[in-house]
Amino acid sequence: MGSGKEKKKHNNKPLPLGPKKVNNTKRKKKEKVKQTKSSNGIAKPKIKVVKEKQLNDVVRFPTAAQQLKFFHEQYQSSNRVQLSSLELESFTETCMLELNPDQDQTSSALADHMKGAFGPSWKQILCEKELDGKIDPGQPALLVISLAALRSLELLRELRPLTSECRAAKLFSKHMKIEEQASSLKNRVNIASGTPSRIKKLIDMEALGLSRLAVIVLDMKTDAKGYSLLTLPQVRDEFWDLYRNYFHQRVMEGALRICLYGDLPANIKRKKNDKDE
């Protein structure tokens, strides 16, 4: 009996010690991992290098010449055409709207940029709401084209200083019936914002007119996946369809200016062209 108890006592003693030793070794291993990660100075410089590259890969305030070069390449590569020498003579830097570099080129500054673009008569062109003999309904002077409906709304909110008297037209399909949009275009419209597909449909049905259109703002902001108005395949194709049919000739004639609003890639050649084909 005595030897049995001694055996039990002997067997019970190491049991609580085993787990403690395992836990201690685990903690030590975790501490070592933490120390190696925190003491290793390679991670921080890598992050800084990436950030520097991202900043260097974009042009924050593109000049008219930079906008023109970018737009030419996008037009030719997306449509698989070569602009003729006659078109290139007409399609010059004067077709592009260069914004004031002293102002931030963000959506919050869009209203101020447009005031400068339309000059001293900006208030009469962009703010007045009464129809007269010279202005027909549904004829905006400024058209903002975006990648998606939510982005169109964001830009319209920032244009509120210009739309307090005369409401801007929302030209996108999300939660909006085309019949309702056509009805709203029976009033005076100075500013409109929307997506390429819905804009083209409203022009096709003669609800949206272009006789007053002086500036089109093409929003260059990218989405979460890095796509923009001119790179997201379906939307890109819809935009160029709209542009070829209704804007290109007016740009060639000098009646319409284009503004690429936002950062442009420093390397303006399309890297994804082969994949798209």
Image: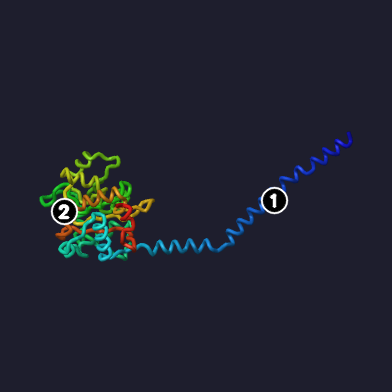
- Report the residue at 15% width, 44% height from top: 206
Q: Quick one: SS at disc 1?
A: helix
Q: Is residue 36 above or below residue 242?
A: below
Pick the residue in front: 181 or 108. Answer: 181
Kind of residue indicated by mark 1: Asn
Outermost residue on the top side: it is 1
Q: Residues within 10 Å of mark 2 (few under 14, many from 20)?
A: some
Residue linked to disc 2: 212
Q: Is residue 22 left or right of residue 211?
A: right
Quadrant housing residue 7: top right
Pick the residue in front: 73 or 185. Answer: 73
1 vs 2, front mark: 1
Residue linked to disc 1: 24
Kind of residue indicated by mark 2: Arg
Pick the residue in front: 218 or 213. Answer: 218
Outermost residue on the left side: it is 133
Quadrant housing residue 120: bottom left
Q: Is residue 36 above or below residue 18?
A: below
- Report the residue at 30% width, 64% height from top: 62
Q: Residues within 10 Å of mark 1 (few under 14, many from 20)?
A: few
- Report the residue at 24% width, 57% height from top: 75
Q: Does residue 59 show up?
A: no
Q: Is residue 10 above or below residue 31?
A: above
Q: Quick one: SS at disc 2?
A: loop
Residue 270 placement (x, y as % from top left): 31, 58
Q: Is residue 186 left or right of residue 50?
A: left
Residue 44 placement (x, y as % from top left): 51, 62
- Report the residue at 20% width, 44% height from top: 201
Q: Is residue 14 above or below residue 91?
A: above
**Badge number at residue 131:** none
